[in-house]
Image (cartoon, grey):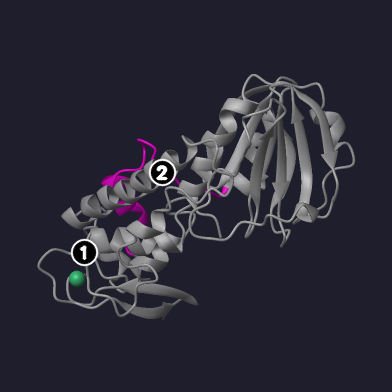
Amino acid sequence: MPELPEVETVRRGLQPVMEGARFTRVEARRGDLRWPLPKDFAARLEGKTVAGLGRRAKYLLADLSSGDVLLMHLGMSGSFRVAHARAGFGEATPGAYYHERGKDAAHDHVVFHMSSGARISFNDPRRFGSMKIVARGELEQEPLLRALGPEPLGNAFDAAMLARACRGKMTSLKAALSDQKVVAGLGNIYVCEALHRARLSPRRRASTIASRAGAPKERAQALVDAIKAVLNDAIAAGGSSLRDHRRTDGELGLFQHNFRVYDRAGMPCPTPGCSGTIRRAVQTGRSTFFCPVCQK
Ligand SMILES: [Zn+2]
């Protein structure tokens, strides 16, 4: 499943061809994504200009001149492909990180023709992706967004906030960080990577990063720093893939080469001076990768 850095990279890849551009034509080839597209989907987009392309957790939000907001989610297998009408620009698939991207045009379910000359195709073989149009004034009440916790790269997300959220929590740190209400959009990969960087065991009880009154311990600061660092590193790696527009497969800047623990069971721990071996365990139904020696 695409995770936050990948979605941010997709946003940065789409921004130059969407922001300030108008939808000249919209093809909704298959209406049955995760939920049906509204009947007036194309009509509500055509002729409208994208004032800005933002992101909240793993949702892309295109702010439209009509006062509507187009919400887009990549689901399990969704990707965007950008083709330019002008010769020589080629195609690009921003945001390919760890997961294979569909290339079969039969799965291009939605196509945006933009006044920038770009044709943006949404490809999604498994159709867990989704698009929804919401009036800007109703965004606060939008059920998809309302329950989301703080944005991990936002200024509001700090040690004090994380400690408050984990205060008294008897669940593991792994489970707490995977909870969208504690911090939004942090997926399995980056939870594992952040815990390793912070040298905290995924099995540690979440409440142990806070005092009984909910004040942050040093561990909370280490964890927040690790979360921001790993996400920023991954976004930077994705950003490097965006600079080369001739690539069509999006295979550049794969952050997986920088994973320290994820999918590396049996490999030596990369922490300097640590003699541990990365181990895989299952926690709340998901794979957890960690070093039993340096993560306490
Ligand atoms: Zn280690």
Q: Is residue 166 magenta?
A: yes
Quarter of the displayed picture in which ligand 1 can be seen:
bottom left
Q: Residue at x 56, y 50 (%)?
A: 147
Q: Looking at the image, can residue 219 be seen?
A: yes
Q: Which residue is mark 2?
A: 235
The stretch in magenta equals: 147-168
Question: From this viewpoint, which residue is outermost toward the front?
Answer: 88
Q: Are marks 1 and 2 in contact (CB under 8 Å)?
A: no
In front here: 255 or 217? 255
> If you read the primary sequence from the N terminus, does the residue marked by circle 1 or circle 2 appear first?
1
Q: Which mark is residue 294?
A: none
Give residue 183's position: percent from left, percent from top. Answer: 43, 51
Give residue 233's position: percent from left, percent from top. Answer: 33, 46
Most frequent secondary structure within the magenta stretch: loop
Give residue 35's position: percent from left, percent from top. Answer: 78, 54
Q: Which mark is residue 199?
A: 1
Q: Residue at x 63, y 27 (%)?
A: 17
